[in-house]
Amino acid sequence: MVPELPALPALTRAEGELVDAYLDVVDQLGRINPSRASHTYGALRAAQALVGRAVALRDALELMHRRGESEVHAATLARALRVLDGERRARRVTVPDGSAR
């Protein structure tokens, strides 16, 4: 049985797009990370995809700014990132601890 995840906090559409785009960027960076990648082709493909994901992230932030959403509600967005497994996904961007090898 799969445990029930906590509910995603209420977000504006632009905030939702920001969170999604940010996690897409994090995922691509994790695939590119030379301390974790195993093949150059996969890292190359992720680097190519990163460009589009970065544009989507910029667009989400521009939309928020244009709509007058001038503040980032960090605590709420952090809760959303946790629900969407952002902590695990972001760990792939870091350099692994050398003692584990």
Image: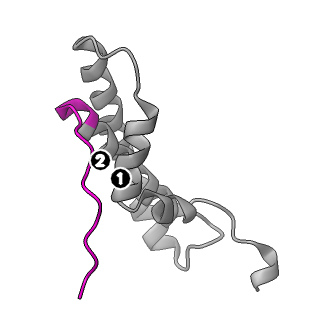
User: Outermost residue, right direction?
Assistant: 99
- Give the overall secondary structure of the magenta segment: loop
- Amino acid type of the residue that numbered disc 1 sits on in the rendered structure: Asp
* Camera-nearest residue between 14 and 51: 14
- Amino acid type of the residue that numbered disc 2 sits on in the rendered structure: Asp
Q: Residue 9 location, x and y as percent? A: 27, 44
Which residues lie in the magenta part?
Answer: 1-15
50 w.r.t. 13: above or below: below
Residue at 25% in and 82% down: 2
User: Outermost residue, left direction?
Assistant: 13
SS at mark 1 in the image: helix
Q: Which residue is mark 1?
A: 24
5 in magenta: yes
Q: Give the left or right position of residue 7, taking residue 77 as reference.
A: left
Q: Residue 38 location, x and y as percent? A: 55, 80
**In the rendered structure, are the residues bearing label 1 and label 2 in contact, judged by CB atoms less than 8 Å apart?**
yes
